[in-house]
Image: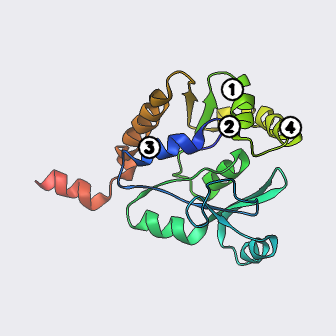
Amino acid sequence: MSGPSGAGKDTLVEGLKARHERLLYSVSATTRAPRPGERDNVDYFFLKHEEFRRRIAEHAFIEWREYNGNLYGMPRSFIEEKLRDGYDIVLKPEVNGALAIKKQLPDAVLIFIVPDKFSHLRSRLEARRTETNEQIASRLEIAHDEFTFIRRFDYLVINEEARPKQAVDDLEAIVRAERYRIHRYLDNRLKELEDS
């Protein structure tokens, strides 16, 4: 799940997780400072730059990127382990990170999240009260660039200000549809159905 900062990805992930017990959120690592209320090892793995760089050298991330002056990465071991265990994993990389993940995990499903009005991004970022006007301006500039990649994603979900539950419903429909794609069934399960 990706899209511009302020699109509501965190809220949507929480709504989706509440509906699916076999769906896990993969916590990202970052070098940015925690926002008020964020917890280490729950919301993010908050790392010092030196530690993050060490993990890059060890190939510990499926992908990593610099975004707005900070480093972000998706931990490889957690993702690979939980996929083997049969879980659906939700990731929230930035847009280029999502495209890089798709190259390494071709079965990944890319969902682009946008608000119903671009102007809502600014008001949501300002409501956080965690960034300066310059940082907000930088995020909005990045958001314009990110919109150019929409056609490289599999799905678009519009997070309407007046109907937040609808976006979670849309995400749930995507998860359910993707679970029933034929290529996701193991051959032995199809054989069991045929032989029953």
Q: Can residue 118 be seen by looking at this rendering?
A: no
Label 2 secondary element: loop
Instruction: Identify the residue at horizontal 80%, vertical 44% (top origin).
Output: 131
Give the mark, 1 or 2, whose residue is nearer the N terminus.
2
Mark 1 sits on what residue?
Answer: 120
Give the mark, 1 or 4, whose residue is nearer the N terminus.
1
Q: Residue furthest right?
A: 134
Q: Can residue 83 be seen by looking at this rendering?
A: yes
Q: Is residue 25 left or right of residue 95?
A: left
Do the residues under discs 4 and 2 have CB atoms within 8 angstroms? no
Query: Residue 130: x percent and y percent?
Result: 75, 46
Mark 4 sits on what residue?
Answer: 133
Closer to viewer: mark 4 or mark 2: 4
Mark 2 sits on what residue?
Answer: 6
Mark 3 sits on what residue?
Answer: 16
Q: CA distance from mark 1 to mark 3?
A: 22 Å
Badge 4 density bin: few <14, some 14–19, many ≥20, Cα 10 Å: few
Q: CA distance from mark 1 to mark 2?
A: 8 Å
Q: Identify the amino acid type marked 4.
A: Asn
Label 4 secondary element: helix
Q: CA distance from mark 4 to mark 3?
A: 31 Å
Query: Residue 129: x percent and y percent?
Result: 74, 41
For this rendering, which residue is in front, 137 or 107?
Answer: 137
Image quarter (top left, top right, bottom left or bottom right) of the N terminus? top right
For this rendering, which residue is in front, 47 or 36?
Answer: 36
Q: Identify the amino acid type marked 2.
A: Gly
Q: Identify the amino acid type marked 1.
A: His
Do the residues under discs 2 and 3 have CB atoms within 8 angstroms? no
Give the mark, 4 or 2, whose residue is nearer the N terminus.
2
Badge 2 density bin: few <14, some 14–19, many ≥20, Cα 10 Å: many
